Image (cartoon, rainbow, N blue to C red):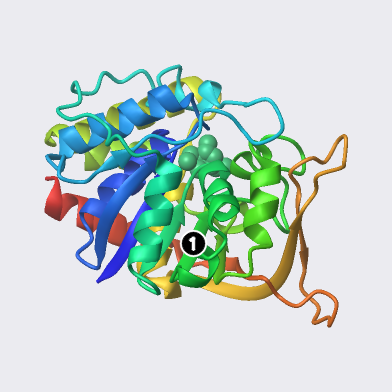
Amino acid sequence: MLRIILDTDPGIDDALAFFLALASPEVQIEAITTVSGNVHVDHTTRNALALLTLAGRTDIPVARGCADALVIPQVHAAEVHGDNGVGGVVLPAPAVQPVAQHAVDLIIERVLAAPGEITLVTIGPLTNIALALRRESSVAQKVREVVMMGGAVRVPGNVTPSAEFNIYADPHAAHAVFHAGWPMRLVSLDVTTRVLLARDQVMTWTQGAGKVKTAMREMMAYYFDVFAPTSDTPQFQMHDPLCLASAFCPDLITWEPAYVDVELAGSLTLGETVGYFKPSAHRPPNMQVSAAADAERFIRLFLERIDQTFP
Ligand code: BDR
Ligand code: CA
């Protein structure tokens, strides 16, 4: 059983990743930690609690994390995810509160309490993770692995021509995380933009469905209607669910070792992820980077598991 802490900024695709995690017997979610990203942390925390309430899994603790990026002003992506982060969908009122502990403290405590056991799956900006490292650097030796959604290594970004949102939103945090010397896998736009759910497929799949799949349909409908209204065949990019699945099923993705750094100085390229793939004594690989994904297998796995757990 893979014990994970899911660090997240829900977020429509974050919500899909939640439900996939809850539907996957290989995964035990130790805790969910929230961060500002797609929307402010007040909203991402409420969304996390409401999504767990919807799924009947309020046994999983949620810890509220950082409201602001380390150095730069916080940016959000409400234009993609709606003002409330879940496409304007009204989720049930949370049946529980966040735990009193701050996300950064929870991450440190849980990782140190179970050396070599906890995988950090990060699907938002890396502010909480960078602060955990800063407060207690030994988490880098105690974590099992970090699997993160972020970056655009060989492809264009989705916020600027060179930067992907999770890295762009807190590039200084990403820089600290990339250089922590821990085992890391990066699930980047190089593969996530090719793993897609089409609108017609979503509408057929969710017909007559229960409350979880209905919420999923409504969230994705917002994305299709508002974010991609001009396309005849809009498709939803499965960034965060693919990252989550690759944590417990690594062979969904082909990985390439690389030294990846984050641009912190460029006035036009802030947050760019720069990958060095040629072996070099000066820049030994600091992570495994996604090179290709088996999109068909992942989409099948996603649809089947959601069907089984949330018909
Ligand atoms: C990432 O940015 C967010 O908008 C998504 O939730 C995903 O984590 C994709 O660039
Ligand atoms: Ca996210």
**Residue that badge 1 annotates:** 147
Q: Residue 38, image x and y in percent?
A: 51, 30
Q: Is mark 1 within 8 Å of ligand 1?
A: no
Quadrant for the N terminus, please: bottom left
- Position of residue 51 in the picture relative to residue 179 (left or right): left
Residue 98 appears in the figure:
yes
Query: Foreground: 21 or 299?
Result: 21
Disc 1, SS: strand
- At 42% from the left and 46% from the top, the residue drawn is 105
| Image position of 75 with respect to 191: above or below | above
On the image, which quarter does residue 50 sit in? top left
Badge 1 local density, few (<14 within 10 Å), some, or many (20+)?
many
- Position of residue 298 measured from the top left corner of the image (x, y, whole percent): 38, 62
Q: Residue shown at 80%/82% (left/top)?
A: 279
Q: Answer left or right for 98 relative to 119.
A: left
The answer to which quarter of the image holds residue 118 is bottom left
Which of 190/286 is in front?
286
Q: What x and y, as percent, mark residue 300?
A: 31, 60
The percent coordinates of residue 64 (x first, y second) are: 38, 34
Work out which quarter of the rendered image holds the C terminus and state it. top left
Q: How many marks?
A: 1
Foreground pick, 214 / 296: 214
